[in-house]
Amino acid sequence: MTERAGSVQHRPSFPALFGLVCLLCAALAAAPLRAAPYAAMVMDARTGEVLHARNADTRLHPASTTKMMTLYVVFEAIRLGEITLDTDVRVSPNAANEVPSRLGLRAGTTIRLRYLIRAAAIRSGNDAATAMAEAISGSEEAFARRMNRTARALGMHRTTFRNAHGLTAEGHLSTAHDMTIMGRRLFYDYPQYYNLFSRREEDAGIARVRNTNRVVLDSYRGADGIKTGYTNAAGFNLVASAERGNVRIIATVFGGQSAAWRNQRIMELLDLGFAEAPAQATVRRPSLPVYGPDDDNGPTGTVTRPSGLVSRSIRPVQRPGETPPLVAPEPAPELLAAIEQAVGAALSPADTTAPDTAADTPEPEAEAVSAMPAAATNPPVPRPETVAAAESEPEPESEPEPETAPETSSETSAAETATASLAVPPRPADPPPPNPAVPAEPEVVTRASSDGSRLYGVSLGAQPSHHAAERLLLRTALSEIGTFDQALRQVLQRNGGFEARFQGLTEDQAQHACARLSARNVACEPVGPAS
Protein backbone atom coordinates (compact mmCIF):
# COMPACT_ATOMS: atom_id res chain seq x y z
CA MET A 1 0.00 0.00 0.00
CA THR A 2 1.15 3.47 -0.72
CA GLU A 3 0.73 6.26 1.77
CA ARG A 4 -0.70 9.47 0.60
CA ALA A 5 1.25 12.61 1.09
CA GLY A 6 0.37 14.39 4.30
CA SER A 7 -1.31 11.42 5.85
CA VAL A 8 1.50 10.80 8.36
CA GLN A 9 1.31 12.97 11.59
CA HIS A 10 4.50 13.48 13.63
CA ARG A 11 3.88 13.76 17.43
CA PRO A 12 6.55 15.04 19.82
CA SER A 13 8.25 12.33 21.86
CA PHE A 14 8.15 12.22 25.71
CA PRO A 15 11.82 13.24 26.09
CA ALA A 16 11.15 16.34 24.05
CA LEU A 17 8.18 17.33 26.28
CA PHE A 18 10.22 16.74 29.42
CA GLY A 19 13.00 18.97 28.12
CA LEU A 20 10.54 21.72 27.32
CA VAL A 21 9.13 21.63 30.86
CA CYS A 22 12.62 21.81 32.33
CA LEU A 23 13.45 24.85 30.20
CA LEU A 24 10.25 26.56 31.39
CA CYS A 25 11.03 25.85 35.06
CA ALA A 26 14.55 27.17 34.65
CA ALA A 27 13.22 30.35 33.10
CA LEU A 28 10.79 30.85 35.99
CA ALA A 29 13.52 30.21 38.52
CA ALA A 30 15.79 32.72 36.83
CA ALA A 31 13.13 35.44 37.09
CA PRO A 32 13.01 36.63 40.74
CA LEU A 33 9.55 36.89 42.32
CA ARG A 34 8.76 40.09 44.19
CA ALA A 35 6.34 39.36 47.03
CA ALA A 36 6.13 42.98 48.15
CA PRO A 37 7.60 46.39 47.34
CA TYR A 38 11.21 46.87 48.38
CA ALA A 39 11.90 49.20 51.30
CA ALA A 40 15.09 49.99 53.21
CA MET A 41 16.39 52.17 56.03
CA VAL A 42 19.86 52.80 57.48
CA MET A 43 20.26 54.62 60.82
CA ASP A 44 23.11 55.72 63.06
CA ALA A 45 22.04 54.04 66.30
CA ARG A 46 24.00 56.50 68.44
CA THR A 47 22.07 59.57 67.32
CA GLY A 48 19.02 58.24 65.51
CA GLU A 49 20.11 60.03 62.32
CA VAL A 50 18.80 58.51 59.09
CA LEU A 51 21.67 57.77 56.68
CA HIS A 52 19.68 56.12 53.86
CA ALA A 53 15.99 55.56 53.15
CA ARG A 54 13.96 54.10 50.31
CA ASN A 55 10.20 53.61 50.62
CA ALA A 56 10.92 53.73 54.35
CA ASP A 57 7.46 55.03 55.32
CA THR A 58 5.48 52.64 53.10
CA ARG A 59 3.21 50.40 55.20
CA LEU A 60 4.15 46.79 54.46
CA HIS A 61 3.84 43.37 56.07
CA PRO A 62 6.51 43.08 58.81
CA ALA A 63 6.34 39.24 59.13
CA SER A 64 8.38 37.92 62.09
CA THR A 65 10.16 41.21 62.70
CA THR A 66 6.95 41.74 64.70
CA LYS A 67 8.51 39.63 67.44
CA MET A 68 10.88 42.51 68.24
CA MET A 69 7.91 44.41 69.66
CA THR A 70 6.58 41.23 71.30
CA LEU A 71 9.88 40.78 73.14
CA TYR A 72 10.07 44.49 73.99
CA VAL A 73 6.67 44.29 75.76
CA VAL A 74 7.76 41.09 77.55
CA PHE A 75 10.95 42.80 78.78
CA GLU A 76 8.83 45.74 79.94
CA ALA A 77 6.49 43.42 81.86
CA ILE A 78 9.49 41.85 83.60
CA ARG A 79 10.83 45.31 84.51
CA LEU A 80 7.46 46.32 85.97
CA GLY A 81 7.20 43.14 88.06
CA GLU A 82 4.22 41.71 86.19
CA ILE A 83 6.05 38.46 85.41
CA THR A 84 9.49 36.91 85.95
CA LEU A 85 11.89 34.91 83.82
CA ASP A 86 11.14 31.84 85.95
CA THR A 87 7.35 32.12 85.73
CA ASP A 88 5.81 28.88 84.51
CA VAL A 89 3.61 29.62 81.51
CA ARG A 90 0.78 27.23 80.66
CA VAL A 91 0.48 26.56 76.94
CA SER A 92 -3.01 27.02 75.53
CA PRO A 93 -4.39 25.09 72.54
CA ASN A 94 -4.35 28.36 70.60
CA ALA A 95 -0.61 28.75 71.13
CA ALA A 96 0.17 25.09 70.52
CA ASN A 97 -1.66 25.12 67.17
CA GLU A 98 0.26 28.05 65.64
CA VAL A 99 1.75 27.34 62.22
CA PRO A 100 5.55 27.11 61.72
CA SER A 101 8.01 28.21 62.50
CA ARG A 102 7.42 26.64 65.92
CA LEU A 103 9.22 25.51 69.03
CA GLY A 104 6.87 22.49 69.30
CA LEU A 105 4.84 23.39 72.40
CA ARG A 106 2.02 21.05 73.45
CA ALA A 107 -1.30 22.25 74.86
CA GLY A 108 -1.67 21.89 78.64
CA THR A 109 2.06 21.79 79.38
CA THR A 110 4.01 24.47 81.22
CA ILE A 111 7.32 26.04 80.31
CA ARG A 112 9.37 28.81 81.88
CA LEU A 113 9.18 32.26 80.37
CA ARG A 114 12.95 32.42 79.75
CA TYR A 115 12.71 29.49 77.31
CA LEU A 116 9.85 31.12 75.42
CA ILE A 117 11.92 34.30 75.06
CA ARG A 118 14.81 32.32 73.62
CA ALA A 119 12.54 30.47 71.21
CA ALA A 120 10.96 33.68 69.94
CA ALA A 121 14.21 35.65 69.62
CA ILE A 122 16.42 32.92 68.16
CA ARG A 123 14.14 30.37 66.48
CA SER A 124 11.32 32.86 65.72
CA GLY A 125 8.78 30.44 67.22
CA ASN A 126 5.21 31.54 66.58
CA ASP A 127 3.84 29.27 69.32
CA ALA A 128 6.29 30.77 71.83
CA ALA A 129 5.24 34.33 70.93
CA THR A 130 1.54 33.53 71.38
CA ALA A 131 2.15 31.75 74.70
CA MET A 132 3.98 34.80 76.09
CA ALA A 133 1.24 37.14 74.88
CA GLU A 134 -1.49 35.13 76.60
CA ALA A 135 0.56 34.83 79.80
CA ILE A 136 1.00 38.59 80.12
CA SER A 137 -2.29 40.00 78.82
CA GLY A 138 -4.68 37.06 79.02
CA SER A 139 -5.31 36.92 75.29
CA GLU A 140 -3.45 37.63 72.08
CA GLU A 141 -5.92 40.40 71.21
CA ALA A 142 -5.29 42.21 74.49
CA PHE A 143 -1.55 41.82 74.03
CA ALA A 144 -1.79 43.29 70.51
CA ARG A 145 -3.52 46.35 71.98
CA ARG A 146 -0.63 46.73 74.41
CA MET A 147 1.83 46.40 71.51
CA ASN A 148 0.04 49.23 69.70
CA ARG A 149 0.08 51.39 72.82
CA THR A 150 3.84 50.84 73.14
CA ALA A 151 4.38 51.54 69.43
CA ARG A 152 2.67 54.93 69.77
CA ALA A 153 4.79 55.76 72.83
CA LEU A 154 7.98 54.87 70.92
CA GLY A 155 7.08 57.04 67.93
CA MET A 156 6.17 54.18 65.57
CA HIS A 157 3.19 56.08 64.21
CA ARG A 158 2.65 54.06 61.03
CA THR A 159 2.59 50.64 62.70
CA THR A 160 -0.45 48.59 63.66
CA PHE A 161 -0.20 45.14 65.21
CA ARG A 162 -2.88 42.46 65.21
CA ASN A 163 -0.93 39.54 66.70
CA ALA A 164 2.28 38.72 68.53
CA HIS A 165 3.97 36.48 65.92
CA GLY A 166 3.72 38.47 62.66
CA LEU A 167 1.76 36.08 60.47
CA THR A 168 -0.15 37.93 57.77
CA ALA A 169 -3.38 39.49 59.07
CA GLU A 170 -5.57 42.31 57.84
CA GLY A 171 -4.26 45.63 59.17
CA HIS A 172 -1.06 44.08 60.57
CA LEU A 173 1.38 46.51 58.94
CA SER A 174 4.56 48.43 59.68
CA THR A 175 7.33 50.33 57.88
CA ALA A 176 11.08 50.00 57.47
CA HIS A 177 11.43 53.27 59.39
CA ASP A 178 9.35 52.10 62.37
CA MET A 179 11.11 48.74 62.58
CA THR A 180 14.50 50.46 62.56
CA ILE A 181 13.30 52.53 65.52
CA MET A 182 12.20 49.29 67.19
CA GLY A 183 15.66 47.77 66.77
CA ARG A 184 17.33 50.84 68.26
CA ARG A 185 14.99 50.85 71.28
CA LEU A 186 15.70 47.18 72.00
CA PHE A 187 19.43 47.92 72.14
CA TYR A 188 19.20 51.00 74.38
CA ASP A 189 16.15 50.23 76.55
CA TYR A 190 16.95 46.59 77.40
CA PRO A 191 20.69 46.02 76.84
CA GLN A 192 20.68 43.21 79.43
CA TYR A 193 18.64 41.06 77.03
CA TYR A 194 20.11 42.22 73.72
CA ASN A 195 22.75 39.48 73.60
CA LEU A 196 19.93 37.01 72.90
CA PHE A 197 19.80 38.14 69.27
CA SER A 198 23.45 37.21 68.60
CA ARG A 199 23.35 33.69 70.03
CA ARG A 200 23.81 31.13 67.26
CA GLU A 201 22.26 28.27 69.28
CA GLU A 202 20.56 28.02 72.67
CA ASP A 203 18.58 25.71 74.95
CA ALA A 204 14.85 26.47 74.82
CA GLY A 205 13.71 23.98 77.45
CA ILE A 206 12.20 21.30 75.23
CA ALA A 207 14.66 21.63 72.36
CA ARG A 208 17.80 23.40 71.23
CA VAL A 209 17.12 26.20 68.77
CA ARG A 210 19.35 27.68 66.06
CA ASN A 211 19.38 31.31 65.02
CA THR A 212 17.58 32.18 61.77
CA ASN A 213 20.10 35.01 61.18
CA ARG A 214 23.26 32.86 61.30
CA VAL A 215 24.47 33.84 57.82
CA VAL A 216 24.75 37.56 58.59
CA LEU A 217 26.07 36.95 62.11
CA ASP A 218 28.83 34.70 60.76
CA SER A 219 29.60 36.65 57.57
CA TYR A 220 29.59 40.30 58.63
CA ARG A 221 32.16 41.64 61.06
CA GLY A 222 30.56 43.26 64.08
CA ALA A 223 27.03 41.94 63.42
CA ASP A 224 25.10 41.11 66.61
CA GLY A 225 21.40 40.93 65.62
CA ILE A 226 18.57 41.43 65.25
CA LYS A 227 15.56 39.66 63.64
CA THR A 228 14.55 37.99 60.40
CA GLY A 229 11.06 37.58 58.94
CA TYR A 230 9.35 35.91 56.01
CA THR A 231 5.83 35.38 54.68
CA ASN A 232 4.50 35.11 51.15
CA ALA A 233 2.95 38.55 51.45
CA ALA A 234 5.98 40.20 53.07
CA GLY A 235 8.86 38.62 51.24
CA PHE A 236 12.21 38.29 53.01
CA ASN A 237 12.63 40.90 55.76
CA LEU A 238 15.52 41.60 58.12
CA VAL A 239 16.46 44.17 60.75
CA ALA A 240 20.22 43.93 61.41
CA SER A 241 22.65 45.71 63.71
CA ALA A 242 26.44 45.83 63.74
CA GLU A 243 29.07 47.68 65.76
CA ARG A 244 32.60 48.62 64.73
CA GLY A 245 34.66 50.74 67.07
CA ASN A 246 32.43 53.49 68.45
CA VAL A 247 29.92 53.27 65.60
CA ARG A 248 26.73 51.22 65.64
CA ILE A 249 24.56 50.96 62.52
CA ILE A 250 21.03 49.55 62.24
CA ALA A 251 19.73 48.61 58.77
CA THR A 252 16.33 47.26 57.66
CA VAL A 253 15.23 45.51 54.47
CA PHE A 254 11.59 44.77 53.57
CA GLY A 255 10.44 42.82 50.51
CA GLY A 256 13.59 40.84 49.78
CA GLN A 257 13.51 38.53 46.74
CA SER A 258 15.15 35.62 48.56
CA ALA A 259 17.03 34.91 51.75
CA ALA A 260 20.39 35.13 49.97
CA TRP A 261 19.42 38.37 48.20
CA ARG A 262 18.18 39.86 51.50
CA ASN A 263 21.37 38.92 53.35
CA GLN A 264 23.57 40.39 50.63
CA ARG A 265 21.54 43.59 50.52
CA ILE A 266 21.58 44.07 54.30
CA MET A 267 25.38 43.79 54.38
CA GLU A 268 25.62 46.39 51.60
CA LEU A 269 23.40 48.72 53.61
CA LEU A 270 25.52 48.21 56.73
CA ASP A 271 28.63 49.07 54.70
CA LEU A 272 26.88 52.22 53.50
CA GLY A 273 26.07 53.16 57.08
CA PHE A 274 29.62 52.75 58.35
CA ALA A 275 30.89 54.79 55.40
CA GLU A 276 28.43 57.65 56.06
CA ALA A 277 28.42 57.78 59.87
CA PRO A 278 31.02 59.94 61.65
CA ALA A 279 33.65 58.19 63.73
CA GLN A 280 32.71 60.23 66.80
CA ALA A 281 29.20 61.26 67.77
CA THR A 282 27.34 62.13 70.95
CA VAL A 283 25.12 59.24 71.97
CA ARG A 284 21.53 60.40 72.35
CA ARG A 285 20.15 57.60 74.47
CA PRO A 286 16.33 57.50 74.37
CA SER A 287 14.33 57.43 77.59
CA LEU A 288 11.88 54.71 78.49
CA PRO A 289 8.37 55.26 77.10
CA VAL A 290 5.88 57.20 79.21
CA TYR A 291 2.24 56.28 78.75
CA GLY A 292 -0.28 59.08 79.06
CA PRO A 293 -4.06 58.85 79.58
CA ASP A 294 -4.68 59.03 75.83
CA ASP A 295 -2.46 56.00 75.18
CA ASP A 296 -5.06 53.66 76.66
CA ASN A 297 -7.89 54.86 74.43
CA GLY A 298 -6.50 54.83 70.94
CA PRO A 299 -8.11 53.48 67.79
CA THR A 300 -7.09 49.94 68.65
CA GLY A 301 -9.09 49.66 71.88
CA THR A 302 -8.65 50.08 75.59
CA VAL A 303 -5.86 48.64 77.69
CA THR A 304 -6.33 48.47 81.45
CA ARG A 305 -3.73 46.78 83.59
CA PRO A 306 -3.41 46.66 87.36
CA SER A 307 -0.60 48.86 88.62
CA GLY A 308 -1.11 48.51 92.35
CA LEU A 309 -1.23 52.29 92.76
CA VAL A 310 -4.17 54.25 94.17
CA SER A 311 -5.18 57.67 92.90
CA ARG A 312 -6.62 58.79 96.24
CA SER A 313 -6.38 57.82 99.88
CA ILE A 314 -9.11 55.37 100.85
CA ARG A 315 -10.59 55.68 104.32
CA PRO A 316 -9.99 52.46 106.29
CA VAL A 317 -13.04 50.37 107.07
CA GLN A 318 -13.80 49.94 110.77
CA ARG A 319 -13.17 46.44 111.99
CA PRO A 320 -16.06 44.53 113.63
CA GLY A 321 -16.28 45.10 117.36
CA GLU A 322 -13.86 48.00 117.37
CA THR A 323 -15.04 51.19 119.12
CA PRO A 324 -13.86 54.33 117.35
CA PRO A 325 -12.09 56.91 119.52
CA LEU A 326 -14.36 59.65 120.84
CA VAL A 327 -13.29 63.21 120.17
CA ALA A 328 -15.24 66.07 121.71
CA PRO A 329 -16.28 68.45 118.97
CA GLU A 330 -16.88 72.15 119.37
CA PRO A 331 -20.31 72.96 120.93
CA ALA A 332 -22.96 73.54 118.33
CA PRO A 333 -23.85 77.24 117.86
CA GLU A 334 -27.54 76.42 118.34
CA LEU A 335 -26.79 74.82 121.72
CA LEU A 336 -24.80 77.82 122.93
CA ALA A 337 -27.55 80.20 121.81
CA ALA A 338 -30.18 78.16 123.65
CA ILE A 339 -28.14 78.18 126.88
CA GLU A 340 -27.61 81.96 126.71
CA GLN A 341 -31.31 82.49 126.06
CA ALA A 342 -32.23 80.33 129.07
CA VAL A 343 -29.80 82.19 131.34
CA GLY A 344 -31.10 85.58 130.18
CA ALA A 345 -34.70 84.54 130.73
CA ALA A 346 -33.87 83.25 134.21
CA LEU A 347 -32.19 86.50 135.25
CA SER A 348 -34.96 88.81 133.96
CA PRO A 349 -37.46 88.45 136.95
CA ALA A 350 -35.02 89.94 139.45
CA ASP A 351 -34.68 93.02 137.23
CA THR A 352 -38.41 93.59 136.66
CA THR A 353 -39.83 92.88 140.15
CA ALA A 354 -38.43 95.75 142.19
CA PRO A 355 -36.06 97.94 140.27
CA ASP A 356 -35.80 100.66 142.93
CA THR A 357 -35.00 98.44 145.87
CA ALA A 358 -32.62 96.34 143.81
CA ALA A 359 -30.52 99.40 143.08
CA ASP A 360 -30.34 100.34 146.76
CA THR A 361 -29.84 96.85 148.20
CA PRO A 362 -28.08 94.50 145.74
CA GLU A 363 -27.50 91.75 148.31
CA PRO A 364 -30.59 89.60 147.42
CA GLU A 365 -29.71 89.68 143.73
CA ALA A 366 -26.13 88.73 144.49
CA GLU A 367 -27.39 85.92 146.72
CA ALA A 368 -29.65 84.65 143.92
CA VAL A 369 -26.80 84.63 141.41
CA SER A 370 -24.50 82.88 143.87
CA ALA A 371 -27.16 80.23 144.43
CA MET A 372 -27.25 79.36 140.68
CA PRO A 373 -25.61 76.07 139.77
CA ALA A 374 -22.29 76.25 137.96
CA ALA A 375 -23.95 74.86 134.82
CA ALA A 376 -26.05 78.04 134.48
CA THR A 377 -23.33 80.63 135.04
CA ASN A 378 -20.56 78.88 133.11
CA PRO A 379 -22.08 76.55 130.50
CA PRO A 380 -19.70 73.57 130.15
CA VAL A 381 -18.38 72.15 126.91
CA PRO A 382 -20.46 69.02 126.20
CA ARG A 383 -18.65 65.84 127.16
CA PRO A 384 -18.11 63.14 124.55
CA GLU A 385 -20.81 60.98 126.12
CA THR A 386 -23.50 63.66 125.75
CA VAL A 387 -22.57 65.23 122.42
CA ALA A 388 -24.61 62.85 120.31
CA ALA A 389 -27.67 63.22 122.52
CA ALA A 390 -27.46 67.00 122.50
CA GLU A 391 -27.26 67.12 118.72
CA SER A 392 -30.16 64.72 118.23
CA GLU A 393 -32.62 66.37 120.61
CA PRO A 394 -34.72 69.39 119.52
CA GLU A 395 -33.54 72.87 120.38
CA PRO A 396 -34.48 73.63 124.03
CA GLU A 397 -37.09 76.31 124.50
CA SER A 398 -36.42 79.27 126.77
CA GLU A 399 -37.76 78.92 130.29
CA PRO A 400 -40.96 80.91 130.99
CA GLU A 401 -40.60 84.01 133.09
CA PRO A 402 -41.98 83.68 136.64
CA GLU A 403 -45.05 85.66 137.55
CA THR A 404 -44.45 89.12 138.93
CA ALA A 405 -44.40 89.09 142.73
CA PRO A 406 -47.23 90.97 144.55
CA GLU A 407 -46.47 94.44 145.76
CA THR A 408 -46.85 93.31 149.37
CA SER A 409 -44.05 90.69 148.99
CA SER A 410 -40.72 91.47 150.59
CA GLU A 411 -37.31 91.60 148.93
CA THR A 412 -36.50 88.17 150.45
CA SER A 413 -39.52 86.52 148.84
CA ALA A 414 -38.51 88.03 145.46
CA ALA A 415 -35.02 86.59 145.85
CA GLU A 416 -36.43 83.17 146.77
CA THR A 417 -38.68 83.27 143.71
CA ALA A 418 -35.74 84.08 141.43
CA THR A 419 -33.64 81.35 143.04
CA ALA A 420 -36.38 78.75 142.54
CA SER A 421 -36.83 79.75 138.90
CA LEU A 422 -33.10 79.37 138.18
CA ALA A 423 -32.84 75.85 139.58
CA VAL A 424 -31.67 73.32 136.96
CA PRO A 425 -31.15 69.60 137.30
CA PRO A 426 -27.67 68.72 138.57
CA ARG A 427 -25.13 67.42 136.03
CA PRO A 428 -24.36 63.69 136.25
CA ALA A 429 -21.20 62.93 138.12
CA ASP A 430 -18.07 62.52 136.01
CA PRO A 431 -16.60 59.00 135.90
CA PRO A 432 -13.69 58.50 138.30
CA PRO A 433 -10.28 59.15 136.72
CA PRO A 434 -8.18 56.07 135.96
CA ASN A 435 -5.80 54.98 138.64
CA PRO A 436 -2.28 55.90 137.46
CA ALA A 437 -0.80 53.19 139.65
CA VAL A 438 -2.50 50.45 137.59
CA PRO A 439 -1.16 50.40 133.98
CA ALA A 440 -3.80 50.10 131.30
CA GLU A 441 -3.89 46.74 129.60
CA PRO A 442 -2.46 47.11 126.05
CA GLU A 443 -4.95 46.59 123.26
CA VAL A 444 -3.91 43.80 120.89
CA VAL A 445 -5.02 44.25 117.30
CA THR A 446 -4.78 41.12 115.18
CA ARG A 447 -5.52 40.31 111.57
CA ALA A 448 -7.19 37.24 110.18
CA SER A 449 -6.66 34.04 112.11
CA SER A 450 -5.35 30.89 110.54
CA ASP A 451 -7.29 28.73 112.99
CA GLY A 452 -10.53 26.91 112.37
CA SER A 453 -11.69 27.20 108.77
CA ARG A 454 -9.20 29.94 107.81
CA LEU A 455 -6.55 27.51 106.65
CA TYR A 456 -6.49 28.49 102.99
CA GLY A 457 -4.61 31.14 101.07
CA VAL A 458 -3.74 32.55 97.66
CA SER A 459 -0.28 32.20 96.12
CA LEU A 460 0.95 34.89 93.69
CA GLY A 461 3.92 32.81 92.55
CA ALA A 462 7.66 32.96 93.13
CA GLN A 463 9.52 36.29 93.01
CA PRO A 464 13.26 36.87 92.53
CA SER A 465 13.73 38.54 95.92
CA HIS A 466 12.05 38.99 99.30
CA HIS A 467 11.59 42.68 98.54
CA ALA A 468 9.90 41.93 95.22
CA ALA A 469 7.51 39.51 96.93
CA GLU A 470 6.61 42.11 99.58
CA ARG A 471 6.01 44.73 96.89
CA LEU A 472 3.75 42.38 94.95
CA LEU A 473 1.72 41.56 98.06
CA LEU A 474 1.33 45.22 99.00
CA ARG A 475 0.42 46.24 95.46
CA THR A 476 -2.16 43.47 95.19
CA ALA A 477 -3.62 44.24 98.63
CA LEU A 478 -4.06 47.91 97.74
CA SER A 479 -5.78 47.07 94.46
CA GLU A 480 -8.05 44.47 96.15
CA ILE A 481 -8.75 45.99 99.57
CA GLY A 482 -12.20 44.42 99.83
CA THR A 483 -10.75 40.98 99.09
CA PHE A 484 -7.62 40.86 101.26
CA ASP A 485 -8.46 43.34 104.04
CA GLN A 486 -8.39 40.55 106.66
CA ALA A 487 -5.72 38.34 105.11
CA LEU A 488 -2.17 37.84 106.31
CA ARG A 489 0.68 38.70 103.93
CA GLN A 490 3.36 36.02 103.96
CA VAL A 491 6.64 35.49 102.06
CA LEU A 492 7.97 31.92 101.94
CA GLN A 493 11.47 31.15 100.73
CA ARG A 494 11.31 28.37 98.18
CA ASN A 495 13.85 26.78 95.89
CA GLY A 496 14.62 29.35 93.25
CA GLY A 497 12.72 32.31 94.73
CA PHE A 498 10.41 33.81 97.33
CA GLU A 499 6.74 32.86 97.17
CA ALA A 500 4.23 35.67 97.85
CA ARG A 501 1.09 34.48 99.68
CA PHE A 502 -2.08 35.78 101.29
CA GLN A 503 -2.90 33.47 104.20
CA GLY A 504 -5.74 33.18 106.70
CA LEU A 505 -8.70 32.78 104.33
CA THR A 506 -11.52 30.28 104.13
CA GLU A 507 -11.67 27.99 101.14
CA ASP A 508 -14.48 30.04 99.56
CA GLN A 509 -12.62 33.28 100.17
CA ALA A 510 -9.45 31.90 98.57
CA GLN A 511 -11.33 30.67 95.51
CA HIS A 512 -13.19 33.98 95.18
CA ALA A 513 -10.02 36.05 95.60
CA CYS A 514 -8.12 34.06 93.00
CA ALA A 515 -11.02 34.36 90.56
CA ARG A 516 -10.98 38.15 90.94
CA LEU A 517 -7.22 38.30 90.38
CA SER A 518 -7.39 36.02 87.35
CA ALA A 519 -10.04 38.28 85.83
CA ARG A 520 -7.51 41.12 86.10
CA ASN A 521 -4.74 39.07 84.49
CA VAL A 522 -2.87 38.53 87.77
CA ALA A 523 -1.37 35.06 88.13
CA CYS A 524 -2.57 33.33 91.30
CA GLU A 525 -3.32 29.89 92.72
CA PRO A 526 -5.47 28.89 95.73
CA VAL A 527 -3.48 26.93 98.31
CA GLY A 528 -4.79 24.63 101.00
CA PRO A 529 -3.66 23.70 104.53
CA ALA A 530 -1.09 21.20 103.30
CA SER A 531 0.58 23.58 100.82
Image (tube, rainbow, N blue to C red):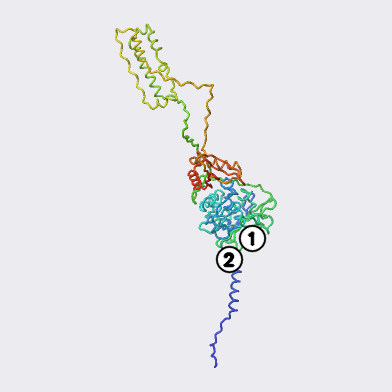
Separation (CA) of disc 1 from disc 2: 16 Å
* Mark 1 vs 2, N-terminal side: 2
**Which quarter of the picture shows residue 166?**
bottom right
- The answer, for residue 130, to whether it is visible in the render is no
Q: In which quarter of the image is the N terminus?
A: bottom right
Spot the residue most to the top.
Answer: 360
Task: Say few, some or many: other residues with alpha carbon within 10 Å of mark 1 (under 14 / 14 to 19 / 20 or more).
Answer: many
Task: Say few, some or many: other residues with alpha carbon within 10 Å of mark 2 (under 14 / 14 to 19 / 20 or more).
Answer: few
Type of residue at label 2? Leu
Q: Which of 150 and 250 is in front in this view?
A: 150
Q: In this view, does 219 lie to the left or right of 412?
A: right
Q: In this view, does 316 lie above or below 304?
A: above
- The residue at 58%/78% (across/down) is 17
Image mark for residue 263:
1
Could you say where residue 32 lies in the image, as x and y percent from the top left?
A: 60, 66
Type of residue at label 1? Asn
Could you say where residue 338 lies in the image, as x and y percent from the top left?
A: 38, 21
**Which quarter of the picture shows residue 381?**
top left
Could you say where residue 434 lies in the image, as x and y percent from the top left?
A: 50, 22
**Which quarter of the picture shows residue 216?**
bottom right
Q: In this view, does 510 lie to the left or right of 401?
A: right
Could you say where residue 7 lies in the image, as x and y percent from the top left?
A: 53, 88
Mark 1, secondary structure of its residue:
helix
Residue that label 2 marks: 33
- The answer, for residue 396, to whether it is visible in the render is yes
Mark 1 touching mark 2, by CB under 8 A?
Answer: no
Spot the residue most to the right.
Answer: 245
